Image (spheres, rainbow, N blue to C red):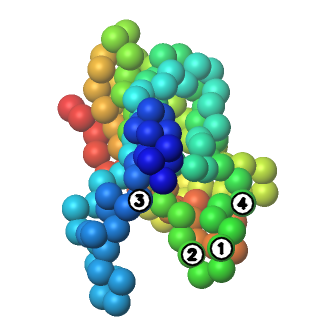
C-alpha cells in the first residue's frame, strides 16, 4: 500500500482514500469536492475534446475547430458533462467553432447558433456541454464570457 501512495504522489494523482472521508454513502452527499483540470493546452487549428476530463482548459492560439467526444457517456441512465474553459492567447481575435462528432449534433440553448467567444487577448469564455446516455445531441450553453 505504501508503494501505491508513493506512485500516486509521484504522478500527481488523487488518492481516493483522502476523499473517502467526505463521502456519506447513504445520503448522496460529497463534501469539499473539487474537479481536476489540467493546465491550458493550445488548440492549434483543430482539437478533439478528451472524454476523460470533466473540466478542460484550452488556449485558443489559432482559428480552431473544437470537436466534442463521440458516443458519450455509454453507461445506462448516466449523463456526461464537460466544462470547457477557453482562453484567447496574447494575440486574441482568434475564432473558435464547436463541432459535433459524426452522427451527432450540438444544440446551443435551443438554437443551432453558437454563442460568441471573447476575442480580446487573454480573455476567457466558458461553455458547459452535457450529453445524456443514448442521446445523439450535445446540449451546450455558454456560462461565462469575459468582457
In percent of width and height, residue 111 lies at: 50, 59
| Cα separation between marks 1 and 2 | 6 Å
Distance, label 3 to label 1, CA atoms, is: 22 Å
Residue that numbered label 2 is attached to: 78
Nearer to us of marks 1 and 4 is: 1
Q: Nearer the viewer, residue 125 or 108?
A: 125
Counting from the top left corner in percent of width and height, residue 55 is at 43, 47
Q: Return the residue at label 1.
A: 75
Residue at 28% in and 69% down = 21
Instruction: Please tell me whether mark 2 sits on a helix, a strand or a loop.
Output: loop
Question: Pointer 4: what residue?
Answer: 71
Q: Residues within 10 Å of mark 2 (few under 14, many from 20)?
A: few
- In whole angstroms, how far apart are the C-alphas of marks 4 and 2? 12 Å
Q: Give the number of the disc on residue 34.
A: none
Callout 4 secondary element:
loop
> What residue is disc 3 on?
16
Q: Residue at x 62, y 31 (%)?
A: 47
Q: Is residue 98 left or right of residue 136?
A: left
Among the 4 quarters of the image, the one containing residue 138: bottom right
Amino acid at each position: 500500500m505504501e508503494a501505491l501512495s508513493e506512485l500516486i504522489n509521484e504522478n500527481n494523482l488523487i488518492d481516493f482514500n483522502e476523499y473517502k472521508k467526505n463521502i456519506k454513502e447513504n445520503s448522496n452527499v460529497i463534501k469539499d469536492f473539487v474537479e481536476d483540470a489540467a493546465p491550458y493546452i493550445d488548440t492549434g487549428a483543430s482539437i478533439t475534446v478528451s472524454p476523460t476530463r470533466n473540466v478542460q482548459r484550452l488556449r485558443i492560439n489559432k482559428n480552431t475547430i473544437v470537436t466534442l467526444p463521440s458516443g458519450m457517456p455509454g453507461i445506462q441512465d448516466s449523463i456526461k458533462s464537460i466544462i470547457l474553459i477557453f482562453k484567447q492567447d496574447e494575440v486574441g481575435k482568434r475564432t473558435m467553432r464547436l463541432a459535433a462528432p459524426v452522427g451527432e449534433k450540438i444544440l446551443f440553448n435551443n438554437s443551432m447558433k453558437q454563442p460568441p467567444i471573447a476575442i480580446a487577448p487573454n480573455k476567457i469564455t466558458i461553455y458547459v456541454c452535457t450529453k445524456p446516455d443514448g442521446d445523439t445531441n450535445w446540449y451546450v450553453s455558454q456560462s461565462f464570457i469575459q468582457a
